[in-house]
Image (cartoon, rainbow, N blue to C red):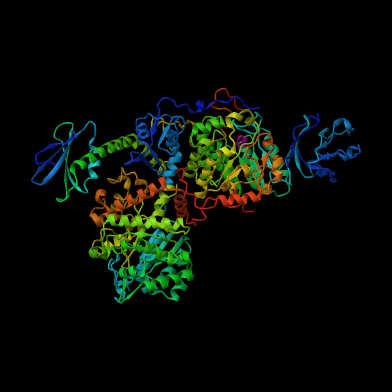
Amino acid sequence: MGEAPTRTDFPALLSSVDPFGSYATIDIDQSVYGDVAVFKAAYWFTDKYYLYLSRPEQGKTRVEIRHKLADNKSNLEEICKQFCNSLIDFRVRQFVLGETAEIRDKLVTKAFFEGQKRLLESDINSNEKNIPSPGSSYLSDELGINAWGKNDSGAPKGS
Amino acid sequence: MGRTEFLPLQHYSHVADGGYSLLPFRFLHETSGTYLLVNEVGEFITLSEQEFQQLIEYTLNPDSSVYLNLKSKHFLVDMQSSAHFEVLASKFRTKKSFLEGFTKLHIFVITLRCNQSCPYCQVSRQNEDAGGQFDIKIDALKRSIDLMLRTAAPQITMEFQGGEPLLNFETIKEAVRYTNERNSNIGKSIDFVVCTNLVPLTDTHLDFFKTNNISISTSLDGPAYLHDKNRPLCGQGSHSMVERGMRRAQEALGKHSVAALMTTTKESLKYPKEIVDEYLRLNMGSIFIRDLNPYGFAVKTAQATGYSTEDFISFYDKVLNYILQINRSGITFSESFASIILQKILTPWPVGFVDLQSPSGAGIGVAVYNYDGDVYASDESRMLAEMGDSTFRLGNVLENSYEEIFLGETMQTIASASCNEALAGCSDCVYQTYCGADPVRHYATQKDIFGNRASSGYCKKNYHIIDLLMNLIRTGDKDIERIFWAWIHHEDVNRMKFTDEALCQ
Amino acid sequence: MPIKLFARGVGTYPSDRIIAKITTNGIDDIDKRADYTYLVRNDQSISAEESNFSGYAAILFEGQSHERTFPRSSVPCIHGLGDLSHIRDGYIVGIEPRTGYLRILYRQDSQNNTIFATDSCNSNCLMCSQPPKEVDNSELTKHHLRLIALIDDAPKAIGITGGEPTLLKDGLIEIIASLKERLPQTHLHMLTNGRLYAYEDLVRSLASVGHGDFVSAIPLYSDVASHHDYIVQAKGAFDQTIQGLYNAAKYGLRIELRIVLHKQTIPRLNNLVSYIYRNLPFVSHVALMGLENMGYVKKNWELLWIDPVDYASELESAVRYLFLRRMNVSIYNLQLCVLPRSLWKFARRSISDYKNIYLDECAKCDLREECGGLFKSGESRHSRAIKALRVNDLATIAVADPSAPDNNRSSGW
């Protein structure tokens, strides 16, 4: 890490020194990594580093990282690279969270409040039609489970 | 005859357009490049980098075994069958069912007086002859018992603590008598435990414990040179007295009625093997490797007893390794914290351990009735109060109602930070399902009930131990597997051997 | 010893099915004769006097029909039933007087009595040993209740099977209630696919009968729906059975799971036992069962057959998985000589007496008494590993394969 701002082999990474010591800057494309992913990644670095997040221009998130302890000799560039990798994982986590948040709410609701509630096809890709609706009776057998070969083409009609 | 034209598998496995949906899970991108996935009900699976990419890009081949495995373990769902939401919800409910019935562990601080002066005392003691103002009063005791019996749980544990509770034995007798009398028409199943250093133990005590089916929990830090350093008894070492007490108690009450807790001090870190050997020598079947809590006198004497989380972790690793080695040689001996985590990872059953559950145990799983009538959300809450911070005081048995104490403002505050599902750092953590939340500890260490996970010792320690066990589960040999299941079932490791014993007849 | 449960003679009497108890000596009290059928042995001389036969439910004649003359009687008669020496006094039989068909329904000296609830089924499993027939279920409940009423000892156990017993719907509830009423001490074991258990009210009704010792034995062939549905040839079957199992757990019905081992179930066997432990830990027993070469199995041989010695490692790890988790697990229908020794203690003598055989090779085996033997249908086709075991050899094996810690890597938990 030099005296003047230095570009590293990482295009988005810049290191420099100010009166408070050396620090590194990462510029992040907001369209690739949403703010939540950036914050979540940053959170885990708050133990050993000071982080400052800003928006230098529309569509960009800037992260400044500096050591908490002046005598910390670990390489800031390495830390920034770790941060970048961590961003990827958190972006994927956000994706999975987004894809499953609704179903998770429904799961908790069903588990603790509405045991009888069924899923709708719009809730999730699944086929609840094989299971009788709550409250239906085996005597009327709305699904025709007792019929031989029901749902299987070429089967004889029910007995 | 029946329909003898059979339809092929494709007829049943055809997935209509629309592919699959993901079910909630959390993951860890491992340094080896693989991904560890864990879902809400504690099932886990390891995927290669490519499999993981395909999973989240919705391009997995529905006929591949990884697809079927993910579906079977409830990581994805498709149109070809129902989501088995019923099953998933029921599993989830089961995993969280430790909540049912509310508070199960009720701790009674019979007296603050103690005959020992341990430098790290987590309880903030008073001298043995300090006098009656540090003993619980009968009206506070009875009112506390009344409150305890109001909890919905059909099975509860009533624990007598101190100080050294045997210094106030008459009150223990009265507490047991009154509890049994009141419970006779309530009908709860109650386990009684006395937490004692065993120094004052007499035959009178043992007779009473035997008659009333009371078990003993004591403290044993290791061999004499370590134990006595940790727990000085005005002038003489206490180890020999603990040993004598344990042997007498084991003889009088049976091996399983005597449990021991160890506390890790800076001195302990040097003796991982010796500590375990001492437990074996004293005929104990397990050990609970506990780190020093940031409460009580421990904080004041941090220079003498303190160590970093990293120190503790490396100590824990050594102890666990040694214990596994012992089990491999055919001796059954378990580490209790590991057993708890293993149950969480490997079984579908709920595990309600107050220090490692979400919602956290404070107030919900445990209540502490202090000698002065105050009720605390946990033993740690009481220690904080002894240090002058009564943040987690729920109320007083002589002044407040059950509702005011257990559903009051303090309880609400604790509850707001007690679900790791909603805590920063925890919400994305792959091990969230197996871990817990501890607002009281985070308050004590970080002055914030929510806490900062990046610098939390609780987080670092639990993450490490869960990770350690998870890796042993995933890469361990059949002996490790057998040993772990023996611990989970409290079974002899040799009886868990799957060998070709001759036919029994 | 295998026993013939069926016989066919000549009958022309226009009456519906009769269920009655065998007597060979006659019953003096005419009023009690309605519960009995008089079995006339081949060598027995009988007087043609009608009064000797009046009041019986039916008369059965051993031997060939042309060998003797028969009394004129208003009681239904079946002749030419051949050798019935295995039928004893007190056995309960079903008789079709129109067709001359005789079936043994109950043997007081057997542990394997089963009520065949119906021949119809709503599934059509690839390996069904008794392929379903479309039958009219409307009269069956009545017959079964009659059978139960005639049992006058207290058997240890009775099975209910089919076809699919739940197709009798509320009739099944009546049958179980009657068994509870008449034979409260008798263990009741019902083979059902559990699909109709998906209706909560059926399970609630079954549970409310309050039979103290009733087990539903339900097959589960895969942890993934499509594979299970394919094996039972019914779409939605997996979903319904799983839902049914959850309903059973909710109402506290005891459940045994049955897994038939064949080429279609072996590949995911270990995923299946893991699914069972994680999702269905409440089941009281898991039975892993060798294939019976009957019914559809003969037709689907290529699709199904895999020699048990070739799936020993899958079976061993599945059993070990359940054993470590304290699940109650058994192996049915497989011979000790085809199993790894580690599995011997899980093998049960499971084959019903009337179709249980041993091969010539078995006569030389020192463990014949401990072994469950084979199905009669296994006589022609069985594992290539069938071989008499000698105690001396076993000792050698034990030395070569000590019960030392098994240090091979686990196959994943």
Q: Where, by quadrant of the figure, is residue C146 drawn?
A: top right
Q: Where is residue B136 in the image (x, y as percent from the top left)?
A: 34, 70
User: Residue at the spot x=29%, y=37% of the render?
Assistant: A94
Quadrant of the image containing the N terminus of chain B: top right
The answer to whether residue B245 of the structure is visible from this angle is yes
The answer to whether residue A135 of the structure is visible from this angle is no
User: Residue at the spot x=33%, y=36% of the render?
Assistant: A96
Q: Where, by quadrant of the figure, is residue B66 drawn?
A: top left
In this orientation, which residue lies closer to the viewer: A145 or B479?
A: B479
Q: Is residue A155 above or below residue B139?
A: above
Q: Is residue C165 on the magenta stretch?
A: yes
Q: What range of the chain is rendered magenta? A: C164-168
In this orientation, which residue lies closer to the viewer: B327 or C354?
A: B327
Q: Is residue B388 above or below residue A32?
A: below
User: Residue at the spot x=71%, y=44% of the render?
Assistant: C363
In this orientation, which residue lies closer to the viewer: A38 or B89?
A: A38
Q: Where is residue B459 in the image (x, y as percent from the top left)?
A: 30, 51
